[in-house]
Structure formats: structure tokens, C-alpha cells
Amino acid sequence: MRVGIVGAGISGLVTAWLVDQECTAVLLEARSRIGGNARSAAGCVENVLGVFDLGTQEIAADDSSAHAALMAAVGIDAHQLIDVPSSHTFSMDGNALLVDDCPGRPAHVGRGPLWEQTRSFLDSVPDLPDRDVPFGAVVESLSPPPAVRDHVLSALPAALFACPVAQVVGLPAHVVLTYLSSVANDEPSTVRVLRGGMESLAWALAARLTTTEVRTGAGVDRVERTADGYALIDTEGHHRVVEQLVLTVPPPTAARLLPASMTGPGAPWHVLRRFAYRPVRYALHLDPAYLPGDRDLWSTYNLISHDGWAESSFWYGPSHGVDVFKSQITHRSAQPRRVLATSTFHALTPTTDLVDAQRALAALQGREGLHFAGHYTTGLGDQESAIASAAAVARRITPGSARLRHLPAP
């Protein structure tokens, strides 16, 4: 059996790794390098050589997670992981409104005027609501102060999903509250990052492919149905015929590639259009452009509310020991000065329709040998979701794959 996989992000690479040795496969990537949203840049800063992520960077700090199992399976051990206390500083107009506790922060530094009110709101929330309940319903029932609502509770999800602060009330409450659970805690949570950058996981997966052909710079122009599968025509006119097709590209790209026969009512094209994305631009830089003037107020995550948006700046000091920052710069009025690299991504907006769209897509998985994988297809839309989606595809195509045993059962 020959399998075609379009997109060499983490979900595409995990799919290829899982079906490898069980069949022949071709993995096509439009960009010049693999990794998708895992984009890393190496540099020597303050005489320290480090690798810094522009895109996806966090791994679940849980040894039972799919991420942990995958890394162990491809030879990434504990020495290549860095566990970092996760802290937040929320600011507006140059004033710190909430400052999380974290190891190393001087004892005299206060938590900010909104810490207690934020903690009170989060403690008042009962169990996570059903997945179709908007965050606005929770806010309306508990009535937090407007400053807490706009500059803390809505700021973090607005930055995560690249949406205006005013639109956070329409996002699913269970998603928003899951991410807010790490804010205003007496004990900071932990985030885990890869010492070699997230892109190192992509290369580790690619290095273990034996029956899979990986082609970069090979964007797929269109897909055509054949008698027993699909023909993939790339931008240079090359034809590749496969029996099973896995689309691991974002929904807008996947929808564009679908054959005309799959664009009618109830077809995948209509489901894929239900997933909403927004562009977000990041910069790696050396100047603390978006952090408080007082260094004692710096956190791993620093969020500023401005002009109806909220944008984050991640400080690599706690993890790498150097002043390197990864900042969202999509809506900033001033850009950083000492820039190492920039890149643009598209962030999934988890609307209240997301779960229904995921269910509708799940019902179409595998029909006519067509499969979809990626962070948007299941769960919260994170890297765990991407890995789980790839495993689900592999279980349909090659249920006997020995490598499936490395990952947690669904």
C-alpha cells in the first residue's frame, strides 16, 4: 500500500513515522524545511549557545503524555528537556496589574492589584462547563471587575488565539478556563521545553523514516481522484499516485486541495470551512521591548493589553539563562530593535462550534481513503492533539504498526 501525506509538521511526521515500515509513503512539504509550526533558531547570546523556538515551544510536563512517550521513542531523553516554572505578568499602560509568584522573584515584589480578584474569580468557577458553553456565560454569572475581565481573564486567551479581547467571551469556557488554571496560583505550574528546540523533534522523527520519501519544496497544487486512490500533482507538475491520502495541512489548505467530488453538501470541504484561523507574527529579539521596566516584575510570560488586543512576550531567561524574548508583534505600535528572527503563523480560534466541527470531521475520517490529521481535529488544538490525531490515522491505515505501541492508547 502507498500512502501520501501532505504537510511535514508534527502531525504529518508522526503519521509518517507510525506507518513507516508497514507501507511505502511519500511526505510532501511546501516549505524548504520540515517542522510546520515547530520552527527553531540557533544563536550565541551572551557567550551562550542556545536554540530558541519561534513557534510551538511547550511540551506537557507530564511523563504520561503522548509527547513524552513520543520523545522517548525517538531517543530524546531527560537531559534534553528543561522544566521551567511558569509565571505571568499582566500589564497595561506600563503598569503591572498581576504578577505571579515564581522562584527567584524578590520577596518585596507585590502580586499586583488584580491578583486577589483574579484568584477569587477562578476559585468561584464550578467544574468546567460543557464544551458548548461560551466563556461569556461564566463571566456574566460571576461578574468579575471589568479590569480583571479585560486585562487578565481575557488577555491570556486573546494572546494565545490571536483574537481581539472583546471576542474572548465567545470562546468555549472549558478552553479558556483550562489555560487560565495556571494564573494567580500560590504554587507556580511547570512548563517543559526542548533544549534543542521543538524542531529537533521533527528531525528526530524524520531521521527514523526508512520506507517514507520526504520531499521538501514540494507544494501540492491539486489532488485528483483515481480509480483506486489519488493523484497528487505538485507545483512542478510531478504526479504521485497513492491509495491512502492524509492531509495534515491547515483546514483552509486542505479544503483547497480536495477534489471537486468532495465539495458538495455534507462533504469534507464544508466541514473544513468551519475551522477559523487568524494570522499571528512572532519575533525573537534581544531587547526587553515588551517587559516591565522593573526587572523584578519579569515573568516567563509577559502580557500587555493595548488597543483591544493582548500580546505576549516569552522570556527565555528562566529556561536558557539569557535575555532572549519571543514576542507577538502583530499589533504592536513599536517593533523590537535587536531582532534575531521573525515568522508568521496562523492560530486556530476555538469557537464554540469547534467540538461539533471536530465530530463532523471525525465522521468523515477514512472515507474513500481520505484522512485528516492536525492540531485542529481533536482536543484543545495543541501539540498533544496533533500527536493524537496522527495516531488515530495510523490506527486506521496500519493498525498492526509496532510503533503505535509506544503511544498511549486512545
Image: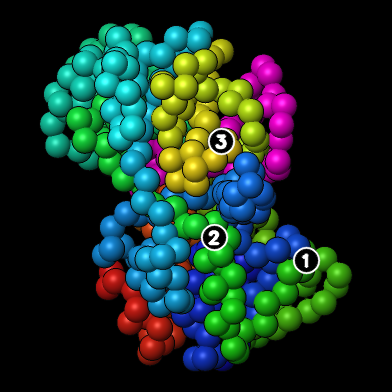
Left or right for 190, reference 122: right
Amino acid type of the residue tagged 2 in the rendering: Gly
Left or right for 246, reference 295: right
| Pair 3/2: label in front | 3
State the residue lying farthest toward the front: 47
Magenta part of the chain: 327-355
Picture coordinates of residue 244 (x, y %)?
Answer: 56, 80
* Secondary element at tag 2: loop
**For residue 323, which numbered disc appears in the image?**
3
**For residue 217, which numbered disc appears in the image?**
1
Question: Along the polypeptide, which appears first: circle 1 or circle 2?
Answer: 2
Q: Is residue 260 above or below residue 229?
A: above
Q: Quadrant of residue 296?
A: top left
Left or right for 337, reference 20: right
* Secondary element at tag 3: loop
* Secondary element at tag 1: loop
Amino acid type of the residue tagged 3 in the rendering: Asp
Residue at (65, 65) in percent of width and height: 34
The C terminus lies in quadrant: bottom left
Q: Is residue 158 above or below residue 13?
A: above
> Is 354 colored magenta in this rendering?
yes
Picture coordinates of residue 256 (x, y %)?
Answer: 67, 56
Instruction: Tell me the residue that label 2 is attached to.
Output: 196
Amino acid type of the residue tagged 1 in the rendering: Gly
The structure's colour scheme is rainbow
Q: Quadrant of residue 378?
A: bottom left
- Local packing at callout 1 (Cα closer than 10 Å; few below 14, some 14-19, many 20+) is some
Question: Along the polypeptide, which appears first: circle 3 or circle 1?
Answer: 1
Left or right for 242, reference 308: right
Q: Nearer the viewer, residue 342 or 103?
A: 103
Q: Mark 3 near mark 2, Cβ–Cβ under 8 Å?
A: no
How far apart in space, not on screen, are marks 1 and 2 (Cα)?
Answer: 24 Å
